[in-house]
Amino acid sequence: MDVEPRVIVWIRAHGIHPADYSEFEARPLRVILLPAVETVDNAFFNRRRHMLELIIFDCDGVLVDSERLAIKVDVAVLAQLGWSLTEAEVIERFVGLSDAHFRMEIESYLGRPLPEGWEARLELLYRDAFRRELRPVEGVTEVLDRIALRTCVASSGSHEKIRFTLGLTGLYDRFEGRIFSATQVARGKPAPDLFLFAAERMGVAPGACVVVEDSAVGVTAARAAGMQVLAYAGGVTPAEKLAGPNTIVFAHMRDLPALLASVSRKAQSARGERADARR
């Protein structure tokens, strides 16, 4: 089906992805482009908003088991700088946040800028640890094989880091072209910007997204974006730090497909109830 470019813009703005254009063939659709007045079946578009269409995965701790390794590096590096923190304290302060935030907090504590090239040296330490020990999160490869819905990655890490860790674990090809970094938005997690950006770029309304996260700041960001959250508590963040509204906490990645199916059924049921209420 050929769709006029300006129609595509309108469709994207209403949370419809180009892959769904074929659904319009059986529906009356008229867009008056000059002047800019639109006449469409808005009920159809609104129903699409309440369907589960996209799974947004965090990377570190959800796809790759990198958090445990990075935390050990962080503890050692901070100690060298004169800031003694336990692994639990590093988790509480920094897990899920961007590299820029990490540097800002260190410089605030030290009361001075970090030396030139410090981040590059830290990145080498991470990479050495990842090359030796990094693995996919247990069960995630099998889960990805079972998921039929569209997926993407939204991570606080840089694109370079995401490519490196997903590449080491054999997961990069599964997400190539659908990877979004906090470096692309004004505010990182816990602000909703990254998840909203990912949804917009994927052409999906926020309400049709579910986020798989493992950090408290990531869960907060997903809630603020108006998205359903599946919070993975099999990593370094305790389950009680992840629990809250619009959030299902789970401990084993093998449970994710069943949880996604449950979320999808509830969304469809809610849509049906709203339709009944309008009758």
Image (cartoon, rainbow, N blue to C red):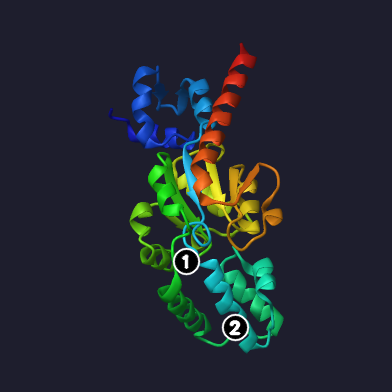
Give the x, y percent position of residue 58.
51, 55
In the image, what residue occupies the spot 37% across and 23% down? 24
Please name the residue shown 67% across and 88% down the image: 82
Q: Residues within 10 Å of mark 2 (few under 14, many from 20)?
A: some
Numbered label attached to residue 214: none
Residue type at mark 1: give it: Ser
Report helix, strand or loop for mark 1.
loop
Residue 42 appears at what percent x and percent y? 51, 23
Is 220 drawn above or below residue 115 in the view shown? above
Residue 2 in picture, x, y percent from top left: 28, 29
Image quarter hosting the N terminus: top left
Q: Which of the labelled discs sits on residue 76, or is there none?
A: 2
Find disc 1 in the rendering and name its residue: 158
Q: Amino acid at mark 2?
A: Ala
Disc 1/disc 2 C-alpha distance (Å): 22 Å
- For marks 1 and 2 on the same chain, the one whose residue lies earlier in the sequence: 2
* Quadrant that contains the C terminus: top right
